[in-house]
Amino acid sequence: MPVGVSEEHAALHDAVRRWTETHCPPSVPRALLDSDSEELPGFWASLVEQGWLGLHVSEPDGGQGFGLAELAVVLEELGRAVAPGPFLPTVLTSAVIAAGGREAIRRALLPGLCDGSTTGAVALGPAAIVAEPAGDGAVRLSGRAGPVLGAAQAGLVVVPATGPDGESWYALDAGDVTVEPLASLDPTRRVGAVVVDGAAVGADRRLPDLDGRVVADLAAIVMSAE
């Protein structure tokens, strides 16, 4: 039974199904099974054009202004088609930043995640990253987190780190981290370890209103929908 519970959801569901039948037949995920590496799928530009990356993000932050229910409808159909690519980790990243970031960081990072100009990943697995004060509210991060879904394709990675004040979450650029591929149970869903080696991160990249319980809840919602 589809996730959609309203006429609008049913219409969205039908639209996503038509899109997947055209752009993601079974041959698309099958081709990834024996591939040594994962690239952006050929349909990525078309997927971005649909505007689904920003369904759950408010309009002032660059999204469509709907919610997680609408996003779940899209994820359900992409999951049915086993659509490869960074859609799920990217929408999880934007959901996390929307939940835990103040206005400045939301306005800086969310538009790119919503328009597909950048992709994201969130560290959900065990993390051993330490934050050391670096002055003016900045920190220096060192450690490792993983496995992280979509890490190799991410332009933005959200990670937790432990500092003098406990756990905090930070949004890092891909250039701040190194990604080491890890074996995945599902070859259509690649994972990697995110390694941070003394990256200096400013206070403007901290997500002050975020904690691990919120991250886990958002991950459970989007992954269950898919």
Image: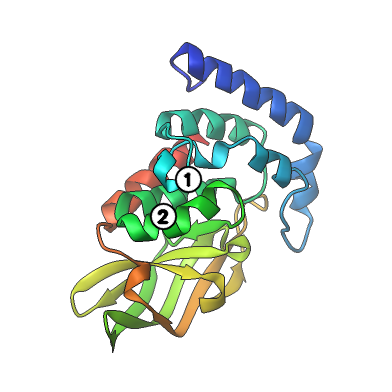
Task: In the displayed orientation, state which residue is furthest to the left.
Answer: 165
Residue under pointer 1:
62
Tell me what residue is drawn at x 37 percent, y 45 percent. 218
Tell me what residue is drawn at x 43 percent, y 34 percent. 65
x then y, percent, for residue 78:
62, 35
Task: In the displayed orientation, state which residue is furthest to the front.
Answer: 60
Estimate how packed mark 2 is, as few (under 14), some (14 to 19) or many (20 or more) residues with alpha carbons within 10 Å: some
> Residue 171 versus residue 65: which sits nearer the camera?
65
x then y, percent, for residue 181:
62, 69
Q: Are marks 1 and 2 in contact (CB under 8 Å)?
A: yes
Q: Which residue type carries mark 1?
A: Gly
Q: Quadrant of residue 134?
A: bottom left
126 versus 175 height, above or below = above
Q: Which residue type carries mark 2?
A: Arg
> Residue 177 versus residue 107: which sits nearer the camera?
107
| SS of the residue under disc 1 | loop
x then y, percent, for residue 152:
62, 65
